[in-house]
Amino acid sequence: MTKIVGIIPARWGSTRFPGKPLYLIAGRPLLQHVWERCRRARALDSVIIATDDMRIAAAAFAWGAEVSLTSARHASGTDRIAEVAAKLRGVSHIINIQGDEPRVDPNLINQLARKMQRDPKIEMITAVHPLENSADAQSPHQVKAVLDRKGRALYFSRSAIPFHRDASATISYYRHQGIYGYRRDLLLRFVRWKPAPLEKAEALEQLRALENGVIIHVVVAKSGSPGVDTPDDARAIECQLLAPPPRPRQVRSR
């Protein structure tokens, strides 16, 4: 039997946006929005917030979340969730969910979890979606991915990949989404590996897995969920959340 736990890493000290997890969006903290969306993913047996900050922990306890306090020395969210995963018993898989995506799709979480449940050979899984605007592929802030014919990752890059030598060729750019599913034993091995040359060059942690021979399976979603990196991003998300739903079209009877 598989038991899958979603873990949301959260830290206070964001360089560009200190205190981001507790920034209020539509009356609730950003992190609470993420947690509530994760709770709607029925494939998860539980959802844990992993943090080293008592302000975040106290707030999360208040809205009813399960919280695990971690070391303040972690270099990445992956290291933080691995500390929590190492203490869990009877858990086969972990899903690492970004704490700054208040519109993360519960259905996507379910897809990742159920694909791992169906195939016990899958050690790691992530998600991508097509870039609607090919100009976005040129941005180093948009991480691109290329896949093989079986839906496995070949490479991730901040550069526009693949390179279109033939302008007439029809090739989609895929944006990588920062959500990962791991078999618990792989996650605990992953954080013991040292960052390798490609990871250092691109500043992309997932390349450490590829460089160590891990097959990363990929789910292709229709669209992605925007992240919050600045207060302006938060205000834009708030406008989306507070916008009234579209009115159903009225069909006149004849």
Image (tube, helix red, strand yellow):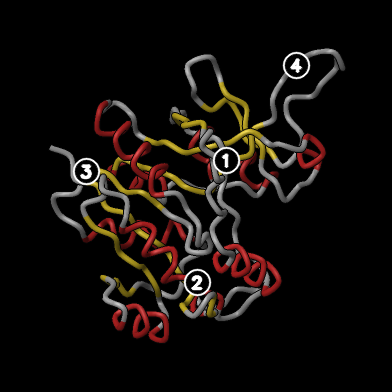
Q: Amino acid at mark 2?
A: Leu
Q: Is residue 15 above or below residue 46?
A: below
**Disc 3 to disc 1: CB gap under 8 Å:** no
SS class, disc 1: loop
**Disc 4 vs disc 1: which is toward the camera?**
1
| Residue located 33% across and 62% down the image | 83
**Disc 3 vs disc 1: which is toward the camera?**
1
Number of labels in the image equals 4
- Between the C-alphas of marks 3 and 1, the distance is 28 Å
- Between the C-alphas of marks 3 and 4, the distance is 40 Å
SS class, disc 3: loop
- Between the C-alphas of marks 1 and 2, the distance is 21 Å
Residue at the disc numbered 1: 223
| Residue located 65% across and 72% down the image | 235
- Between the C-alphas of marks 4 and 1, the distance is 19 Å
Query: Which one is in front, 109 or 8?
Result: 109
Q: Amino acid at mark 4?
A: Thr
Q: Where in the figure is residue 25, as x and y percent of width and height?
A: 54, 75
Give residue 30's mark: 2
Q: Amino acid at mark 3?
A: Ser
Q: Which numbered disc, 4 or 2, marks the residue that appears first in the sequence?
A: 2
| Residue located 31% across and 59% down the image | 39
Q: Amino acid at mark 1?
A: Ser
- Between the C-alphas of marks 2 and 3, the distance is 28 Å
**Disc 4 to disc 1: CB gap under 8 Å:** no
SS class, disc 2: helix
Q: Is residue 51 above or below residue 224?
A: below
Q: Which numbered disc, 4 or 1, marks the residue that appears first in the sequence?
A: 4
Residue at the disc numbered 4: 170
Q: Is residue 33 above or below residue 85?
A: below
